[in-house]
Structures are given as structure tokens and as C-alpha cells.
Image (spheres, coloured by chain):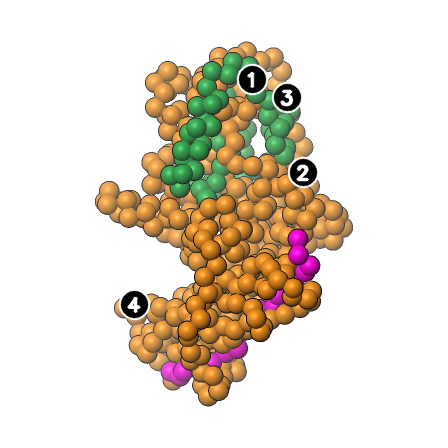
Amino acid sequence: MPGWHRSLREDRALQQRDDWVEVGIIQEQHPHRCRLFMQWQRLDFPVLVDAWNLLGVQVVPLTIGIDEHGIVRETLRSPAAVAAFLDRTYPGVPADPAAAPLVGTIVRQELETGPAATRPDRLVAQLSSVVRHYPRNAGGHFALGVALRQRCESERRQPGDFQAAVAAWQAALDLNPNQYIWRRRIQQYGPKLSKPYAFYDWVPQAIREVRARGEVPVEPVVPLTESERAERTAFAPLSVLVAPDPDGRVTPDERPLVRIEATVVPATVPAGGHGRLHLALRPDGKAGGHWNNEAGPTRIWLEAPPSWEVERPLSDLPVAAGRAVSDELRQTDVEFRVPEGTAAGGYEVKGYALYYACRGADGACVYLRQEIRGRVRVTGKD
Amino acid sequence: MLRRALVLAAAGLLGCGLAAAQPARSGHLVTGRAFPHLSFPDLQTGELRSLSAWRGKRVVLHVFASW
């Protein structure tokens, strides 16, 4: 990560000056991870969160010099460049701030006004309206994807929010394939071989080292998916596994006590390509559902169409230790490969979840099965 | 992580010694233009802040991500 941050902070000549400030702007969906990063690296400069990429930057990291009148002056590539920037004289013409782009104005209005509880719905509605009226507004599609994913992580979540977010990010990228930030957002949740590197592999090390210093690490508000931790390694399917309920004898969860959301990333996969199926399982509080932690793990079994490969057909999701019942999100994501020569069209990666759940914290606990379906659109090869 | 740090440190070293200002152009950050009128949540407090809070000082702005 940014080596020059530390260089700037260790540069005595720069530190003795009081006519400048160091400020960060991050382009991340989940800002609490950057809070952990700042804690781990002992960085304490102010950081603003531009999850929607309202600035429209195409790459990170990037260091920019802005003068005392708020005018963008230059790209800074080293501590020496920072020192030169601070010494340079610029025309003293105070500037009015440049008008914000349409999407930026909308997001700002929604952040500044109205109750926070319904903000996810308002942002999704407003940004949906933007892309409906301006379908070639690529930044609007991207911001809509961010808002949908944010709503998916909130109490306001709607079925299909994550899949709709992936579709919105893809629509943005189709309009501007050179946008590195937008591409990263899909890669974050996508197949291993689409990644330039593991995105959040530093998190376990950061937590260990922060704890070793006697500090309490920043809590991950949104748990890391497997995709976000995955190394860029080869696809290696496990083959010798037995389906846990091949004949469907476990009682179906028809009411259901647990809501399961399946999301495919990317939404369209070329023949010969890879995708990931994300599964999010949450007890439905309205139905009185809870996890029963005294019986066993949640099991996931996945199958793909004939000749397709699923990397890990069987997954066990651990129970919440130390509690008889709980309501936490359980999630996993599994990679699959579409064979070369697969005809374009719609397919399903499907399977089922087997879990122990209770109706009400003191109610009856049962072993249940629920079907899983992830819809994959296969296109011609890129 | 370390691999990325080394690449970035190397990029920083390559930049050392360049005397001329390097123009900026990425999205709405363009040399000679005012920073856009935008507000963002503060990472630590969640409160909305604008870059104009630091008007009167030079700002070294790092646009980055922890991934």
C-alpha cells in the first residue's frame, strides 16, 4: 500500500511546515476495511469516503496537489514532488468550486436530507431514475450499483439487490471499459482468475498485529466474502464428494425460516470462462427464524449443468460459537467454470442448503432443506 | 500486499527528481479547474465533509483504496 504516505510523514522538512494538510479519499464499497487499514498502518490523516466514485477517477492510487484556493494543480508522484508543489507559487485567484456532476448532486442531497433509515431506498430510487432518463450515464449506472449493494447490506435489503448491483456495474463498464475502479468492483466479488491480486488478503494479518499491540481492531461491519480474500490461483475443482441429501428427504423449509439470496458474479460469463455464485443466508426475523447452533453446521451442496465444473460442491458454514441460537448472516461463494463451446443462453448453477433452524428463540428446532438457484447467462467467447 | 507496496514505492522513486509539475487529469480532477463541489462522509465519523474545509491551505490529496 501507499509507501509514500509514510515517506511524507517521515520527511522532517515537510512535517515542520503548517501550510498544508494531507487528506485521503477512498474508492471502496466497504469503508470500515480502510478504517482497519489506517489503524494497522497508524495513519491518522482525515479520509473521505467516495464509494460512488463521484470524482470519476479511473485509477488509484493517485496523489493530487490542490492549492489554497481549491484549484487542482498537479499530480504528485514523490515526496520531492510534494515539496516542490508546496514551494511553487500559483496565481492568487480564488475559484468557485466546479459544479458537481449530476450523480454527485443527487448523492449529496440524499446524504444531507431525509431520515437515514430510508436512505438506501431513496438512493436506489433516485439513481434508477438517472439511468432511466440517461441510459448512457455510465457514472450513474456505477453509483446505482453501489447504492444497491449498500441496500443489500442494510435492513432495507430487497431480494435481488446484489444481482442488480452486479448488472449495474457491468452496464457502467460496458459503457466505459477503461474504468479501472468500476472493473475492480466486479472483480472484488468475481472469479479468482479475473483478479490482479487478492484484494483483502491483508485483513487477517492486520487484525493479528493490531491485537498484538494491545489495541482492539476495527470491527468488520460487512464480513469478507471468500472471493474478496481469494488469491489469484488456478481453478481446482474437487470431484470426490457425495451429495448430502440426494433424494430430497430432508423437510423443505417452505415458509421459510431462512432467506437465501443467490448472486452470480459476473452476471454474464463467456463460454470457457468462470463465474462465482455468492450465497447469503439470513434467518427471517419476521417468520421467527433463528439458527440452531447446538446441532451442526449449515451445509451447501451445488451442482452445475452437465460438463460444467463447480470448484467446491460441498461447503460447511460454521455455527456461531458459544450461543444456542443466533441470527447472523452466513455466506459463502463458490467458483464455477463454463466449458468451451457452451451455447449462448440461460443456465442455472443450483443445489440446496441444509440447516438447523428454530422458530422463535425458545420454539421448535428443525432440520430443513432449501433449494438454491443461481442464474447464469452465457455469451459467446470474448 | 507487500508486492503492491514495493511496486508503489518503486513508482515513487521513479518520480523523484522530476522538477516540472505533472498535470492532473482523472475524472473530475483536472489541472487548472476547481475541485468539484462535492461532500463525502468522513471515514471515522460518518459526517459529511467537503474539501473546502481546508481552504487556505495546500492539500495533498491521496485518492486510494485499501484493496
Q: Position of residue A213 (x, y in %)?
A: 24, 42
Which residue occupies 37% across, 15% down?
A13
Considering only vertical position in the picture, is A316 above or below A13? below
Question: In the image, which lettered chain appears green?
Answer: B
Tag in front: 4 or 1: 1
Mark 1 packing: few (<14 Cα in 10 Å), some, or many (20+)? some
Q: Is residue B4 visible in the rendered structure shown here?
A: yes
The three-letter amino acid code for the residue at tag 3 is Gly
The residues tagged by marks 3 and 4 sit, at their Cα atoms, a distance apart of: 57 Å
In this picture, residue A256 sits left or right of residue A297: right
Q: Position of residue A308 (x, y in %)?
A: 56, 68
Which residue occupies 53% across, 64% down?
A336
The residues tagged by marks 4 and 2 sit, at their Cα atoms, a distance apart of: 48 Å
Which residue occupies 61% across, 32% down?
B26
Instruction: Pick whichever of labels 1 and 3 is earlier in the sequence.
Output: 1
Q: Chain of mark 2?
A: A
Q: Position of residue A81 (x, y in %)?
A: 48, 19
The three-letter amino acid code for the residue at tag 2 is Pro
* Pointer 1 with pointer 3, Cβ within 8 A: no
Q: Position of residue A339 (x, y in %)?
A: 59, 64
Circle 1 sits on which residue?
Answer: B21
Circle 2 sits on which residue?
Answer: A101
Question: In the image, which lettered chain appears orange?
Answer: A
Considering only vertical position in the picture, is A346 above or below A174? below
Q: Where are the magenta residues, as a range?
A: A365-382
The residues tagged by marks 4 and 1 sit, at their Cα atoms, a distance apart of: 57 Å
The three-letter amino acid code for the residue at tag 1 is Ala
Nearest the eye: A77 or A261: A77
Looking at the rendered structure, the secondary structure element under dot 1 is: loop
Circle 4 sits on which residue?
Answer: A321
Labels 2, 3: one chain? no
